[in-house]
Image (cartoon, rainbow, N blue to C red):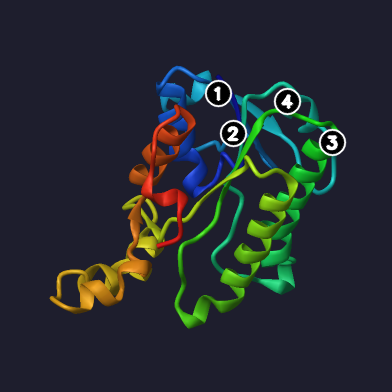
């Protein structure tokens, strides 16, 4: 299948590209800066890297038209308004641009949005942006899919290990592990494999909020 991944050069996107291309899919990554210089693995040579800013140009549109799946992995965990890095710009607006294009072109391809299951109070604004993006996703096409992972972590990103450590410790404490089940972190590779399974027609617990 032909799959377009928005935000493919990012933390979640890179692992998703790797898993999907190794499954034999034709993968196109769309991001502002294209292929990261640090990404030298052989699998990355099989990816079609497109440098396109979804909010400021239309280069990405020609790749979406005949894709079987479009996956939105664009996102940020923390805002920096001084640098124009906001939840609206990096979570809500990309979903709106993609779904509007699909609707206007009466496309029959499938769209998958990576949302979030739950978030502690400090991520209230983050979750509000995710909820809004979910509404936009569902409104455009009832066949669109949403996945609801917990916080994603991987050893390649130290900050993700630090942020999720308290929650991962609590999962080993009897009684408390049931209380925090909705906040359970997920390994980056696990999330990528779950999405790959969904793309291939399989079932996943992550397609429902827990």
In the image, residue 109 above or below residue 7 = above
CA–CA distance in space, label 3 to label 4: 10 Å
Q: Earlier in the sequence, mark 3 or mark 4?
A: 3
Q: Are marks 1 and 4 in contact (CB under 8 Å)?
A: no
Question: Which secondary structure, mark 1?
Answer: loop
Residue 108 found in image quarter: top right
Residue under label 4: 63
* Nearer to us: label 2 or label 1: 1
Location of residue 200 in the rendering, given as x and y in whole percent from the top left corner: 45, 27
**Disc 3 vs disc 1: Cβ atoms closer than 8 Å?**
no
Label 1: few (<14), some or many (≥20) within 10 Å? some
Label 3 vs 1, first from the N-terminus: 1
Q: CA distance from mark 3 to mark 2?
A: 18 Å
Please name the residue that numbered disc 1 is placed on. Answer: 47
Residue to which mark 2 is pinned: 35
Question: Label 3: which residue?
Answer: 58
């Amino acid at each position: 299948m032909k799959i377009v991944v928005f935000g493919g050069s990012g933390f979640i996107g890179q692992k998703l590209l790797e898993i999907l291309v190794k499954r034999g899919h034709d993968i196109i990554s769309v991001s502002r800066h294209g292929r990261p210089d640090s990404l030298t693995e052989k699998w990355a040579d099989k990816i079609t890297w497109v440098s396109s800013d979804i909010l400021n140009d239309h280069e990405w549109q020609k790749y979406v038209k005949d894709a079987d799946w479009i996956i939105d992995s664009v996102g940020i965990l923390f805002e920096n308004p001084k640098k124009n890095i906001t939840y609206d710009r990096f979570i809500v607006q990309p979903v709106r641009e993609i779904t509007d294009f699909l609707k206007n072109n009466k496309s029959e391809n499938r769209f998958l949005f990576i949302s979030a299951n739950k978030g502690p109070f400090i991520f209230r604004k983050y979750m509000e942006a995710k909820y809004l993006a979910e509404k936009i996703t569902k409104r455009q096409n009832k066949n669109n899919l949403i996945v609801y992972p917990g916080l994603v972590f991987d050893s390649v990103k130290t900050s993700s290990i630090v942020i999720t450590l308290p929650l991962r410790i609590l999962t080993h404490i009897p009684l408390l592990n049931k209380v925090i089940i909705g906040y359970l972190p997920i390994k980056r590779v696990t999330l990528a494999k779950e999405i790959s399974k969904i793309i291939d027609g399989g079932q996943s617990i992550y397609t429902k909020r827990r």
